[in-house]
Image (cartoon, rainbow, N blue to C red):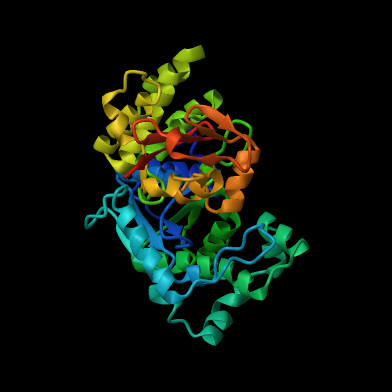
Amino acid sequence: MDVYKILKQRGFIQQMTHESEMADLLREGKVVFYNGYDPTADSLHIGHYLTFMAMSWLQKAGHVPIVLMGGGTGMVGDPDKADKMRPLMDIEQIDHNVERFKAQARKFVDLSEGKAILANNADWLRKLNYADFIREYGIHFSVNRMLAADKYKTKFEGSGLSFFELNYVVMQAYDFLELSRRYGCVMQTGGSDQWSNIVAGVDLIRRIDNKPAYGMTYTLLTTSTGEKMGKTIGGAVWLDAEKTSPYDFYQYWRNVEDADVRNCLCLLTFLPMERINELSALEGRAINDAKEVLAFEVTKLIHGEEEAEKAQNAARALFDKNGASGAGDIPTVEMSKSDFKNNGMALFELLEKAGLAPTRSEARRLIKQGGITVAGNKVTEEAFSVGVEAFEDGELMIQKGKKVHKRIRLV
């Protein structure tokens, strides 16, 4: 398997530090490489999944991945372009999130002995003596070079960059050095926003240990217009079924824009390129067949074939007047009939209780902007109330935007 060719052909690779050397190494050798995951939430999201897909392709070609949990780096957090510093998490929350990440990672990478390594940088970063560490390694980092990196420069010139945040690049570079010494790791991978951090680690290993080290970044998952994918009105598209249901997950991919189908099929599925070429060549209404394949394949890889089938049947049932067998799989919330008597329940309150809006103020905004449909009718009146009479056979369907549906059932 020429995995370098596969990654290039499918559009994974954004940048490489020593491209010709790395291409030969990936074709001919057995490469130990790593990708890091800071536990900023209690679930991985679709952006993480893209890196696991690349990791899986590399593993299938015989290379050995290190899945590195950021129990140490997560105590600082990688600076981003936001005005505010990332919120600090306590140790208990970080460790909890790490355990959740580990459980999800096992779905995508074969972690059996000899095939992969699961590590946590808390094992070495939390034990460091700061004075000794900064004396030995700090001298190898140029602040001028750090601030030349886009994300650091933008924040430095905007809201300001704290010394605390500036430590992150040193910590990540040290991770690469530590993994090189412990496991013979020679390559770090990550999203394209990690380029400057990765280069810092490559330089540190080559300078201190005089060993070969390489870096490769993956393209971010974006639409054809350059917007980042994996975001909804309600937040990120999570891999945890409790945070994003298999049905909502399926619907997200079923409703991508026509121009984004090919890219998603290449990056998020294992379908052969011949099949992808056939599907992406479809036009008009036929492109919906390709979207169904995309949604089913990605949902199957993350939630399993049974859940993918349920989600597909439920999605089709929404448009089946006769009620398809999958109608029971549409996300459903049960509520008391007494809540809707007298003057009924305010729609903005119902949206919050049903999980269609995180807050009542967000629910009001959705209503005013025409983003809510109740029983097939668009509602734009903020004061709209839902009474018992709105339910048909004790059920009411509410739609948010074009992609999210939820059934309210009276009990």
Q: In the image, is residue 254 above or below residue 154?
A: above
The answer to whether residue 218 is visible is no
Tell me which corner region of the image, top left, top right, bottom left or bottom right, holds residue 34: bottom left
In the displayed structure image, the side of residue 367 where residue 43 appears, left or right? left
Q: Residue furthest right?
A: 157
Q: In the image, is residue 235 above or below residue 36?
A: above
The quadrant of the picture occupied by the C terminus is: top left
Name which residue lies at 22% across and 55% down: 112
In the displayed structure image, the side of residue 220 where residue 325 appears, left or right? left
Tell me which corner region of the image, top left, top right, bottom left or bottom right, holds residue 88: bottom right
Q: How many labels does the image show?
A: 0
Q: Residue furthest front?
A: 342
Comparing 86 with 374, the one in front is: 374
Comparing 100 with 360, the one in front is: 360
Comparing 254 with 206, the one in front is: 254
Residue 265 location (% of width, % of height): 43, 30
Residue 314 location (% of width, % of height): 34, 30
Name which residue lies at 52% across and 31% down: 402
Q: Residue furthest left?
A: 113
In the displayed structure image, the side of residue 377 where residue 66 appears, left or right? left
Residue 285 location (% of width, % of height): 48, 14
Comparing 56 with 100, the one in front is: 100
Q: In the image, is residue 42 above or below residue 293?
A: below
Residue 326 location (% of width, % of height): 29, 29
The answer to whether residue 291 is visible is yes
The quadrant of the picture occupied by the N terminus is: top left
Name which residue lies at 58% across and 40% down: 384
